[in-house]
Amino acid sequence: MAPGTAGPRNRSGWDMSETDKPGAERPVPPAQAAQTAAEKRPAPRPPAPDGRPARPPIAIKQQHSTFEVALVSVQALTAAVTMVIALVGAVYVQDEYHDRRQARMTRAWTLLYNTREELFHNVGQVEALQSLHESGANLREIDMSTRYLQGIVLNGASLYRATFQSSKMMEADLQGADLRQSSLSRTNLTRADLSGADLTDALLTGTNLTGARLARARLGGALLSGATLSGADLTGVRGLTADQIGETCADPADPPALPNGLPLPPAC
């Protein structure tokens, strides 16, 4: 075909060139190409409820990450502040408890040593002495002579070399108390409980132990001259000798319970 001469046309009116031959790729009409490109483009995102353009997913994800970081930071700060407040509160409570404990102990000591109506009635000395014991005060070598201490509870107390001479301590609870070298001379310990107490080298001359419980107590070296043991329970005591028993007395109608092998005390 001569140059510039139009080739044969197909039924649609297109000029048949080399590309229009059978098996060759045919050109896409412009209108069809535009329609295909439009179909391939992603659909526009709907606008936000407030009318603003919708943000892309990446921006939304970044915003969520920033919010999560800020939330974690706020939670960490809140936890730190809470911990500081708790520590400050604990220190305040501890100081308050210490101050109250010291004030209570001071009042107790003042009451014990400023009251002189000891033998007639209880004027708060029992409560004061018990409070000191419960607070862990040092009661070693304390002088509680001629006091009215009926029913006092000092079980397990450390009363080494303490003095209760001539005090009224009926029904006192002195279980397991450390009373080594203590002075209980002429003390009324009727029906008192001294089970397991350590009375080694204690002074018990003239002490009224009628009905007292001294089971498993230590009495080695204790001076018992003139002590009354009527109805007392001395089973399992350690360190008690026949010579010590011989210096005591008891009602023959109400003898004490003694370890095997020890004689009964003389009659009062």
Image (cartoon, grey):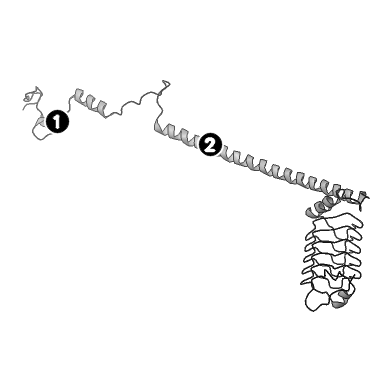
Image side of residue 101 versus residue 16, left or right: right
Q: What's the distance in space between the residues labelled 1 and 2, CA to CA? A: 60 Å
Residue 46 location (% of width, % of height): 36, 24
Residue 63 location (% of width, % of height): 47, 33
Would you place residue 243 above or below residue 197 in this image? below
Residue picked out by circle 2? 71
Query: Which residue is painted at 43% across and 32% down in the image?
Result: 60
Image side of residue 24 versus residue 71, left or right: left
Q: What residue type is disc 2 on?
A: Leu
Query: Which residue is painted at 22% across and 25% down in the image?
Result: 35
Q: What residue type is disc 1 on?
A: Arg
Residue 267 location (% of width, % of height): 89, 72
Would you place residue 102 above or below residue 219 in this image? above
Camera-side mark, 1 or 2: 2
Quarter occupied by the N terminus: top left
| Mark seen at residue 194 | none
Helix, strand, or loop for circle 2? Answer: helix
Between 152 and 206, the one nearer to me in the picture: 206
